[in-house]
Amino acid sequence: MRIDLAAVVLVLSLLAGCGEPAPEQKGFAGLGNQAQAFTPVVPGRVFSFPADHGPHEGFRIEWWYVTANLKDGQGNEFGVQWTLFRSALSAAAPQPGWANQTLWLGHAAVTSAGVHHAAERYARGGTGQAGVRLAPFEAWIDEWRFAGQAGNAFNDLQLSAQDKSFSYRLHLTTDRPLVLQGDHGYSRKSEQGQASYYYSQPFFHADGTVQIDGQRYTVSGPAWLDREWSSQPLTADQTGWDWFSLHLDSGEQVMLYRMRQKDGAPYLTGTWIGADGQPQTLSAAQIVLIPKGTATVAGRSMPVRWSVAIPDKRLDLTLDALNPNAWMNLRIPYWEGPVRLSGSHGGQGYLEMTGY
């Protein structure tokens, strides 16, 4: 589960221009609001590529989300985030021009041990300012781009974004298959049946440059793509989530998320991805995920050190934030940044925390 969908909900109220009061928000960012008019997420969907790299009309929310753990030649560590969200104001087919009922939101960020910069972009559908198209693949908002080279290939892409304090340009390549999360791409988010369609490409390798406050770095490292779409991914009493993507030095990849609730235990699940790309869904009983240390960030206490264990896989890790102050100080704020791994396995990863 990725995301600051709270920002999307706010943008809906700001840009819709309907002049009516916003509906009462249920659950984190209103994602527990009922969505009967939109297409439901049900088990058994057969994914189709390259079509599923593109937008899914009829669903209320979806995103294209990339994170990268990078190092330069001197061993300095960096994190990069690039995200494009599509939000539908209506379940009806999109209209041309400013009558279009689709809104787009972009987030980009860079993180080092001492600096974190984040930026956002907004766009209305139907104007050409933002969108996603296929053959070749391209997702964009303003000058920010995530784009393929030619044809339908999704294994050779360029990623770029820039703002006043940072920029990056990365080349992402892979020879591994896409990974369907959950039950063949059906990813449950609660015991009540809320879910998304969810696939990842956790095996990207990134090469390129990152510029922070006028200093340019040549970098490389692993990158992770997440693709999700849904219409009501949360329940009304889910308050936020903690999401982890881990690149292990052994070649395996791990995705974990903890959906926090107002009352009761969090909903916990994940995926163990073998070095060959084969996924195995992890149940809550197989995962030990405990916050171990906090930092005061933007006036609130954030768990920036975690204990992660999967006994069946002999995994026992401590995760520490590269920069505890990786606060996305945007319209709706949240925490997202790279983490260091120590313990049974080496590696690196990314952590997102919302709703604190």
Image: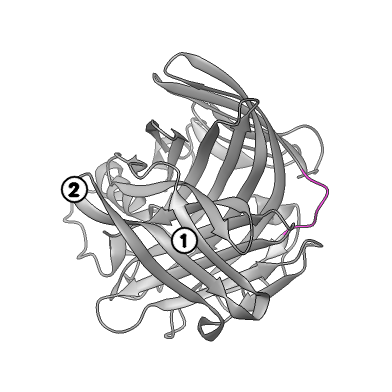
Q: Where is residue 154 in the image (x, y as percent from the top left)?
A: 76, 45
Residue holding disc 1: 243
Q: What stretch is highlighted in magenta?
A: 174-178
Residue sitting at x 58%, y 64%: 255
Which secondary structure, mark 1?
strand
Q: Where 222 sits versus 303, above or below?
A: above
At a point 65% along the width and 81% down the height, the residue shown is 312
Q: Which amino acid does label 2 sit on?
A: Gly
Residue 198 in picture, x, y percent from top left = 59, 64
Q: Can residue 280 be seen in this view?
A: yes
Q: In this view, does 307 lie above or below 354?
A: below
Magenta portion: prevailing SS class? loop
State the residue position of label 2: 19
Tell me the kind of residue under disc 1. Answer: Trp
Mark 1 neighbour density, 10 Å: few (under 14) some (14–19) many (20 or more)? many
Is residue 330 shown left or right of residue 124?
left
Residue 175: in magenta span? yes
Disc 2 residue crowd, few under 14, some 14–19, many 20+, Cα 10 Å:
few
